[in-house]
Image: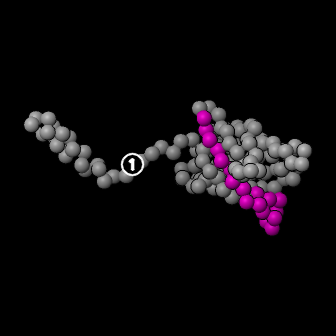
């Protein structure tokens, strides 16, 4: 009987918090799925998806996951200003295509933060704007 009363007392003590939603930590500010576009000008924009994952002390990822995925080769984050530098390589018809991204994280305090900056693919330079989903 005492054990039943103890369990009921414990359940009664926790009941005010039972209806509150659980709040999870979202991890490193750069981790997540980022969707947006890049291009040389306003007229010629291409959709891009960037998947980033913070593992311990390193950032890894992939550009446009799927059959034509481009794995991130180098990723550097500067937490003093939340700037990001990514390098990636892909093969295209036997040749190697170089990808370089230099951007800065905006809206750090929000879930749907954004990254904007310069994007270069095989020497064609432009800008990018992506938002974490």
Please give the residue where the numbered disc 1 appears in the rendered image.
22
**Where residue 40 sits: x, y (%)?**
83, 59
Q: Is residue 115 above or below residue 75?
A: below
Viewed as shown, does residue 122 lie left or right of 80? right
Q: Image quarter for residue 11?
A: top left
Inspect the magenta stretch and tell me whether residue 110 lies in it. Answer: no
Q: Residues within 10 Å of mark 1 (few under 14, many from 20)?
A: few
Q: Which quadrant is the C terminus positioned in?
A: bottom right
Which of these two is toward me, 6 or 99?
6
In this view, the residue farthest toward the left is 1
Viewed as shown, does residue 76 lie left or right of 56? right
**Where residue 112 sits: x, y (%)?**
57, 55
Inspect the magenta stretch and tell me whether residue 49 lies in it. Answer: yes
The residue sitting at 87% across, 53% down in the picture is: 124
Residue 86 visible somewhere in the drawing: no
Q: Which quadrant is the N terminus positioned in?
A: top left
Residue 123 visible somewhere in the drawing: yes
The residue sitting at 31% across, 53% down in the picture is: 19
Q: Which residues are magenta?
A: 38-55
Viewed as shown, does residue 18 lie left or right of 6? right
The residue sitting at 82% across, 44% down in the picture is: 90
Which of these two is toward me, 96 or 37?
96
**Where residue 104 sits: x, y (%)?**
68, 48
**Where residue 58 sits: x, y (%)?**
65, 34
Which of these two is toward me, 8 or 115?
8
């Amino acid at each position: 009987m005492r054990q039943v009363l103890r369990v009921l007392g414990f359940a009664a003590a926790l009941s005010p918090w039972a209806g509150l939603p659980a709040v999870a930590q979202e991890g490193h500010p750069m981790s997540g799925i980022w969707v947006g576009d890049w291009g040389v000008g306003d007229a010629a924009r291409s959709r891009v998806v960037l998947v980033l994952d913070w593992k311990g002390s390193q950032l890894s990822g992939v550009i446009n996951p799927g059959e034509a995925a481009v794995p991130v080769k180098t990723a550097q984050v500067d937490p003093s200003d939340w700037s990001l530098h990514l390098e990636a390589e892909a093969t295209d018809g036997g040749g190697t295509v170089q990808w370089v991204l230099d951007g800065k994280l905006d809206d750090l305090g929000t879930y749907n933060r954004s990254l904007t900056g310069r994007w270069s693919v095989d020497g064609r330079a432009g800008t990018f704007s992506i938002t974490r989903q």
